[in-house]
Image (spheres, coloured by chain):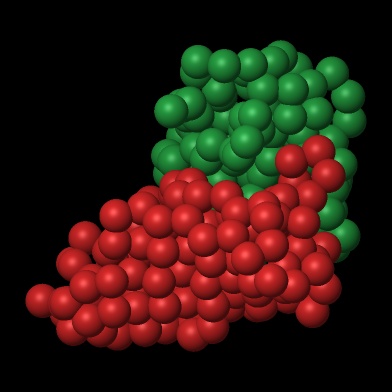
Chain colours: A green, B red
Amino acid sequence: GAVVSQHPSWVICKSGTSVKIECRSLDFQATTMFWYRQFPKQSLMLMATSNEGSKATYEQGVEKDKFLINHASLTLSTLTVTSAHPEDSSFYICSASGPDTQYFGPGTRLTVL
Amino acid sequence: GQQVMQIPQYQHVQEGEDFTTYCNSSTTLSNIQWYKQRPGGHPVFLIQLVKSGEVKKQKRLTFQFGEAKKNSSLHITATQTTDVGTYFCAERYNFNKFYFGSGTKLNVKP
């Protein structure tokens, strides 16, 4: 099946700093990628839809200035958590859209101290 | 987004027992997908159901889509310890957006 990678797999940062997470589709081109966050023991919550060459579409309640998304190429989307705070600590997962389903990256665990 | 509820939230079974998780929606679903997420891992696609009343099988897993397309179920026969994980249903929306159900966490005791 298709492969999606994420980098880094985990990151610890200080409150107030910004963190960039990369999502790459390794063996196919993805015009659309999605970003989810998952709190412990909870479901995946869709944050935003990342469209190659255009602005991302954010779900209701997600701050676009807080979570910056860039989809500059057909194989790379980035999520930047700006001015991170402890409540931003979570598991962030990206996915890339395939013909019938979506393929998930391995996730990035962010801990903000 | 669509509200898709799953029950039960948790299920503990003895190895060899059967397991079923249910996904319910107040509105008609265009389709339903099922995913499995192992502890510490990411969701892995299992199957997609589209047709009313559809039933699909994958070895010990049986997936059903309700006649009214408002509910779906995943049944595992004779669970094994390798079945441990959280099972999510998800509905596919426009432009391949997916909204996930709340998930059912399965624990299998050997």
Residue B105 visible in rendering:
no
Q: Position of residue B61 (x, y in %)?
A: 36, 62
Residue A52 visible in rendering:
yes
Residue B105 appears in which quarter of the rendering?
bottom left
Q: Is residue A7 above or below residue A84?
A: above
Looking at the picture, tell me which residue is in the foreground, B48 or B87: B48
Q: Residue at x 47, y 76 (%)?
A: B21
Q: Position of residue B71 (x, y in %)?
A: 65, 74
Q: Residue at x 50, y 50 (%)?
A: B47
Q: How many marks?
A: 0
Q: Residue at x 88, y 24 (%)?
A: A54
Looking at the picture, tell me which residue is in the foreground, A107 or B21: B21
Q: Is residue A75 above or below residue B31?
A: above
Q: Residue at x 80, y 28 (%)?
A: A51
Q: Is residue B76 above or below residue A33?
A: below
For the N terminus of chain A, give its image quadrant: top left
Looking at the picture, tell me which residue is in the foreground, A25 or B3: B3
Residue B79 appears in which quarter of the rendering?
bottom left
Looking at the picture, tell me which residue is in the foreground, B97 or B76: B76
Q: Position of residue B29 (x, y in %)?
A: 76, 63
Q: Is residue B75 above or below residue A3?
A: below
Q: Position of residue B1 (x, y in %)?
A: 82, 63
